[in-house]
Amino acid sequence: MPRTLTVAAAQLGPIARDEPRSSAVARMVALMEHAHGRGAELVVFPELALTSFFPRWFMPDQSEIDTWFEREMPSADTAPLFEAAARLGVAFHLGYAEIDGANRFNTAILVGPTGEILSKYRKVHLPGHREDEPWRPFQHLEKRYFARGDLGFPVVDALGGHVGMCICNDRRWPETWRLMGLQSAELVCLGYNTPQHYPNAPQHDRLQDFHNHLSMQAGAYQNGTYVVAAAKAGLEEGAELIGGSCIIAPTGEIVALAATRADEVVVADIDFDRCREIRTNIFDFAQHRQPDLYTALAEPAPAPAK
Ligand code: CDV
């Protein structure tokens, strides 16, 4: 009997700096209702989906930084999303900034169709820089505002399959995918905020959409997993964010793709059993991996050759 699930990537257009969480949540509830109308049983929202992408601003005052973080989940602001999920019987994935005691993380949760949190992930690969760099047209201060995630790369049995999560920059690292592949991930949910302009290497600006899909399609194929990826997209506070939200099959093929840089839902039916097409053939880990020769992967990188 096939194990199937109808999944949606819910892309968000720009969120203004002064847009309240209640407004972002109302937009997400509308996207969830739309996705449900198209049969979706799981809706994936972007990274830091409740607010504007605040790491683009240098804020010296910690109390101001903390206004961008959530102290509880659900909260009064996010309760409507949990209520909508339970009303519709839809699971969802949500990215947000989390305060836990003295620590601050870039976090994502998987919430089940009755509104219970099934899994939590905290972003491991934090891009950007720690100090204000006024030469940039916009900052990328994730290294300043977040601690490295401390939960590993969990894969849980949920929604009929093995479900993992990662966040934005994590998708560019093959280790992210393989650590979930080694746990037999069949579906990876992720959100991202990727500027079109990369100040350190502007010659890559034209390649941002290509590198986005290249990384995720490779991760899907090399580990035999579906991917549902949701962008925050469009011109947000002077920074253009790529879109390209998509659903990728274990063959690496994109099976649904957003066409805009605005609020948009894309939907696809997935069959978890198709993951075996990859995992019992070309990427049969038990037969073909050579882990005794991979030990350097867990060591610090040597200095680059001159
Ligand atoms: N939010 C991100 O992690 N963004 C990075 C950008 C800064 C390169 C990304 O990997 O898309």
Image: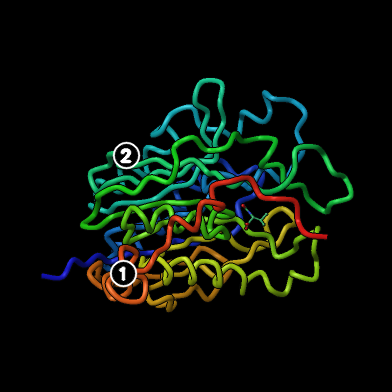
Q: Quadrant of residue 182?
A: bottom left
Give 160 or 279, whichever is nearer the viewer.
Answer: 279
Q: Is residue 256 left or right of residue 116?
A: right
Image vertical order of residue 9 relative to residue 136, above or below: below
- The quadrant of the picture showing ligand 1 is bottom right
Give 5 or 297, whichever is nearer the viewer.
Answer: 297
Quadrant where the C terminus is found in the figure: bottom right
Indicate the amino acid at tag 2.
Answer: Ile
Residue count near mark 1 (Cα–Cα under 10 Å), binned few <14, some 14–19, many ≥20: many
Q: Is residue 204 left or right of residue 193?
A: right
Task: State the residue at coordinates (44%, 61%).
Answer: 10
- Residue 270 appears in the picture as rendered: no
Circle 2 sits in a helix, a strand or a loop, which is it?
Answer: strand
Q: Which residue is mark 1?
A: 279
Image vertical order of residue 199 relative to residue 25, above or below: below
Outermost residue toward the left in this view: 1
Task: State the residue at coordinates (25%, 70%).
Answer: 271
Q: Is residue 132 left or right of residue 99?
A: right
Q: Position of residue 256 (x, y in %)?
A: 42, 75
The CA span between labels 2 and 1 is 29 Å
Circle 1 sits in a helix, a strand or a loop, which is it?
Answer: helix
Task: State the residue at coordinates (46%, 62%).
Answer: 229
Q: Quadrant of residue 266?
A: bottom left
Outermost residue toward the right in this view: 135
Q: Are marks 2 and 1 in contact (CB under 8 Å)?
A: no
Quadrant where the N terminus is found in the figure: bottom left
Q: Which residue is mark 2?
A: 117
Residue count near mark 2 (Cα–Cα under 10 Å), binned few <14, some 14–19, many ≥20: some
* Label 2 lies in ligand 1 vicinity (Cβ under 8 Å): no
Count of numbered marks: 2
Indicate the amino acid at tag 1.
Answer: Arg
Q: Is residue 143 left or right of residue 37?
A: right
